[in-house]
Image (cartoon, rainbow, N blue to C red):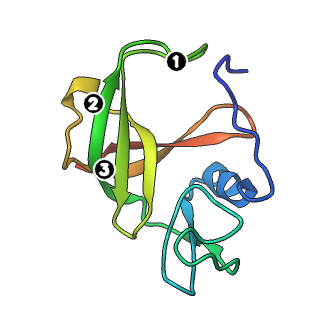
Amino acid sequence: MSLRPVPVPGSLSRPFWEAARRGELVVPHCPACGLRFLVPELACPGCLSRDWAYEPSSGLGTVYSVTVVHRVPGPGFDTPFALAVVDLDDGAVLLTHVVGRAPDEVAIGMRVRVDFRPLTDEITLPYFVPAT
């Protein structure tokens, strides 16, 4: 078992974690206004509709912002690591780790794709790796 904090799925996030365990990225989508968003909320942050559902994402995106974390935020984290805001091609925005390159090589504008890595037997985390 990991020393790193383990996400605890709730009623709103359980479908996200179940999909991640299967190696799929899903994001909340509101059919009323078309917004894709993360994190899941009771109502769409765009129009307040409660009629949203998870939909598959391609998992492809672009690094919008990145910082290299050098100070350990808690047990189970290895530093340094690249913490990035990724704009998904299909609309949602995620705060995530970019792996597969040295942290100081991750740059704004870099194309990335989702990759999944188990944290525990029950929880799999989505990370992003360079798309090329």
Q: Nearer the viewer, mark 1 or mark 2?
A: 1
Residue to which mark 1 is pinned = 73
* Above or below: residue 74 compared with residue 60: above
Image mark for residue 101: 2
> In which image quadrant can residue 82 be found?
top left
Q: Mark 3 or mark 2, which has the lower sequence index?
A: 2
Q: Which amino acid, by three-letter code, is at mark 2?
A: Arg
Disc count in the image?
3
Would you say 55 lies left or right of 67 here? right
Q: Which amino acid, by three-letter code, is at mark 1?
A: Pro
Q: Residue at x 20, y 44 (%)?
A: 108
Image mark for residue 91: none
Q: Position of residue 49 (x, y in %)?
A: 65, 80
* Residue 102 appearing in the image: no
Q: Position of residue 48 (x, y in %)?
A: 62, 75
> What is the C-alpha distance between the residues marked 3 and 2?
11 Å
